[in-house]
Amino acid sequence: MKSVFYRSTRGGVQNVKASKAILTGIAEDGGLFVPNCIPKINLNLEELLNMDYKELAYFVMSKYFTDFTESELKNCIDKAYNDKFDTEGIAAIKKVGDAFVLELYHGPTLAFKDMALSILPHLLVTAAKKQNISKDIVILTATSGDTGKAALEGFTDIEGIKIIVFFPQEGVSAVQKMQMVTHKGNNTYVVGIKGNFDDAQSGVKEIFGDKAFVKFLDQNNYMFSSANSINIGRLVPQIVYYFYAYLKLYKDGEIKKGEKINITVPTGNFGNILAAYYAKEMGLPINKLICASNDNKVLYDFFNTGIYDKQREFVTTISPSMDILISSNLERLLYLLSGQDSNKVKELMNKLNTEGRYEVDKDMKEAAKNFYGNFADQQQTKEAIKKVYDDYSYLMDTHTAVAYSVYDRYKQKSEDLTKTVIASTASPYKFAYSVMNSLDDKYSNYSDFRLCMEMSKILSENEPTAIKDIENRDVLHKTICDKGEIKKQVKKILINLKS
Ligand SMILES: *Cc1c(COP(=O)(O)O)cnc(C)c1O
């Protein structure tokens, strides 16, 4: 098989192996690792048709992680996709009206982040061995709510790894917060910050670029890596489920051989939808990529005007995992749209840093025409939850509802009849308060936890064990810091560990 090497989107790092790229997380020049070229496949549906999720995962990932041996990669896949997931298929597809909802939340933390974060720790440990690293790896993670818990779950008690999670103290749902602050594990640290997700992400990215700090770590026998979707080891596993969805539709007779589908993704950091774009570039028959935003609609503006402008009010919404104004993974798309021109990417990213905005040229805008961007405000999101529940007895979480709302309007406006897969990124239980109050405002005085119970009643099912009785668990992580103190906190945690 052809070897794939990785380089930075900003051109400063070239020709590194997958294991090195996964281990490093972010390139030294501040760019993100991308493959030299996206591997193309010959889509042989009959060959892929009978693969289960793990076999399909191997099919896709082996095209990217070419320095992993077959047994190394299969071992990682086996450890990741097992009975931690509550459905044998790992992902599930439900027909809801004329759309196909791809449920990606059947993992241990009830959000789609599990799809990649259950394998990333194993990829990292394997990569460290391959690179002869004997240092302890410190995973620094910023979370808008779901990455944090999924990363904690994935990395807990893995030897040689410490994980520190920063989350916006006021910006996550009650269930999300409890999932993180009650998390057990000898190598896990969770810190709330007085700020939003962008503050957390910028703080973490800054540490990665701080040479003095990296040296301090080195002297203490540590190295950093990232569990955020800036890590290529998170992006690639996310490509798998788009293949899975396509094959399932074909198997069920919903689409003909080679028929194109649209994919709608509720988007924040642009990782999930970028994985769908990679799948398309690999050769999966995909027509439109429908990028759905909430009130923080930077991406909607970008796809419509070619201008990315982060200088705007940050809105805290009922879909908190999408409350993001700096969508990191867009940098990887810019790289592709510019024809892999790292100088151009560097220039745009500099502008974003210094001026808070940039504008792409006509060619790049034209190259982005496979994307359609729109957004749903909070009222529209709630209406979508209620309408879909009333019409189809299907209960969506607030993020999936953003996608559904955008899909619904796209369908009406465009008259595009292409069959559409909607990525469902979280279980409704994680956002019980907003979901139940979308159905009926009689729930406004109930707590989130009480509403999880009510939800299980109306759905005639048990509450997921992951969150059952979560309000009664011991809070183990109580540290809260100012958004400017992220570095100080990391230092404190690591020094305490040594003493
Ligand atoms: C992270 C997350 C998103 C956004 O995904 P990106 O890859 O960051 O665009 C959407 N919904 C939920 C529930 C999430 O946890």
Image: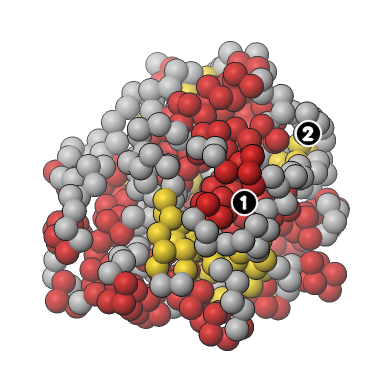
**Residue at horizontal 20 percent and vertical 50 percent from the top:** 463
Quarter of the image with the C terminus is top left
Which residue is tagged 2?
5
Mark 2 Cα-neighbour bin, 10 Å: few <14, some 14–19, many ≥20: many
Mark 2: which secondary structure? loop
**Residue at horizontal 35 percent and vertical 42 percent from the top:** 87
Ligand 1 is within 8 Å of the C-beta of the residue at disc 2:
no
Q: CA distance from mark 1 to mark 2?
A: 18 Å
Residue 194, quarter of picture: bottom left
Q: Is residue 339 visible in the rendered structure shown here?
A: yes
**Residue at horizontal 28 percent and vertical 69 percent from the top:** 393
Residue 80, position in %: x, y? 46, 31
Any mark on residue 275, and which? 1
Ligand 1 is within 8 Å of the C-beta of the residue at disc 1:
yes
Residue 72, position in %: x, y? 59, 20
Foreground: 466 or 131?
466
Q: Amino acid at mark 2?
A: Phe
Of the two numbered discs 1 and 2 on the same chain, state the one appearing first in sequence.
2
